[in-house]
């Protein structure tokens, strides 16, 4: 059972069932909604990770730096909100391609990431997304739930590396049923990201989380990228420039507005 510390929900030990992610929680009947929306998967010492990030130059979070030593990718909503990122692994919305960026293979980062994956028994080959998100002071991420085919097939995990008072991570069954959940440093928390969630940073410094997604049993095609490699992105797809011209041109195109069913 989840416990309360003041008004804060402490995620119980356990794991989100993928059957609880087949549709947004807010669209389920009340008696069909999952019992818990967050779980504690374990704990890990993040002191070395935290020291590394606090010593990281500000430009390391910029896309221009990624274009030189990693690979530049966009996260449209988060980029628009002003959240900085360092990406290790990323997938398209349909789980057709999993891209392992150069940083995921470097000793500098791998020695920090591997113990976290190992702490919950997840093989790196099951990781489909992994990144650091740095949220500036005074910023709020509005209430939302994640979308995309990948969501219902993956486990979403947060590990707070650098956080403090004034950072509120809110999770709920609907927009008007939100509660603060405990994401303290080193706690490995699985979030049902089909539930509503939001974050407010009223702390006096950047809040940094490692965020990653992994699959249970799902066929994956992985690509190891080289520094500076170019990737073409749309809202749902990822295409490697190196593969351009290797596929036949489509015989027809369907044109339509977003979310009108033209991707089906």
Image (cartoon, rainbow, N blue to C red):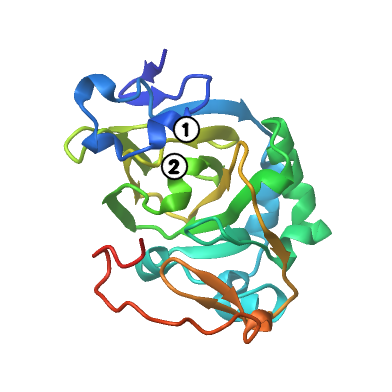
Q: Which residue is mark 2?
A: 152
Asked if labels 2 and 1 touch by Cβ distance under 8 angstroms, the answer is yes
* Residue plotted at (26% across, 63% down): 259
Quadrant of the rendered structure where residue 170 is?
A: top left
Where is residue 114 shown, x and y percent of the image?
A: 75, 44
Callout 2 crowding tier (Cα within 10 Å): few <14, some 14–19, many ≥20: many
Say left or right for 102 vs 261. right
SS class of the residue under badge 1?
A: helix
* Quadrant of the drawing holding the N terminus: top left
Residue 5's place in the image compared with 165, above or below, is above
Q: Residue at x 75, y 74 (%)?
A: 226
Residue 187 image point, x, y percent: 57, 32
Asked if residue 161 is positioned above or below residue 101 in the image, the reply reads above
Q: Which is more toward the observer, 194 or 138?
A: 194
Q: Mark 1 or mark 2: which comes first in sequence?
A: 1
Give the structural element (helix, strand or loop) at label 2: helix
Cα–Cα gap, marks 1 and 2:
6 Å
The residue indicated by pointer 1 is 18
Q: Residue at x 64, y 74 (%)?
A: 71
Say if residue 180 shows up in the picture. Answer: yes
């Amino acid at each position: 059972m989840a416990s309360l510390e003041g008004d804060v929900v402490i995620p119980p030990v356990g794991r989100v069932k993928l059957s609880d992610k087949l549709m947004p929680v807010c669209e389920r009947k009340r008696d069909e909604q999952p019992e818990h929306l967050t779980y504690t998967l374990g704990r890990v010492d993040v002191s070395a990770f935290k020291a590394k990030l606090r010593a990281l130059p500000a430009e390391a979070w910029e896309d221009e730096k990624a274009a030189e030593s990693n690979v530049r990718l966009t996260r449209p909503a988060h980029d628009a909100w002003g959240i900085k990122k360092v990406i290790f692994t990323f997938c398209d919305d349909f789980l057709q391609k999993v891209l392992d960026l150069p940083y995921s293979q470097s000793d500098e980062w791998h020695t920090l990431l591997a113990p976290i994956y190992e702490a919950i028994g997840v093989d790196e080959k099951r990781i489909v997304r992994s990144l650091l998100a740095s949220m500036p002071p005074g910023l709020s991420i509005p209430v939302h739930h994640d979308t995309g085919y990948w969501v219902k097939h993956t486990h979403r995990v947060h590990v707070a590396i650098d956080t403090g008072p004034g950072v509120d991570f809110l999770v709920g069954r609907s927009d008007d049923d939100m509660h603060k959940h405990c994401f303290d440093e080193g706690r490995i928390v699985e979030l049902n990201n089909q539930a509503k969630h939001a974050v407010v940073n009223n702390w006096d410094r950047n809040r940094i989380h490692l965020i990653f997604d992994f699959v249970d049993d799902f066929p994956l095609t992985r690509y190891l990228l080289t520094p500076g490699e170019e990737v073409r992105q749309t809202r749902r797809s990822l295409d490697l420039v190196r593969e351009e011209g290797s596929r036949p041109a489509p015989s027809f195109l369907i044109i339509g507005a977003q979310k009108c069913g033209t991707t089906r």
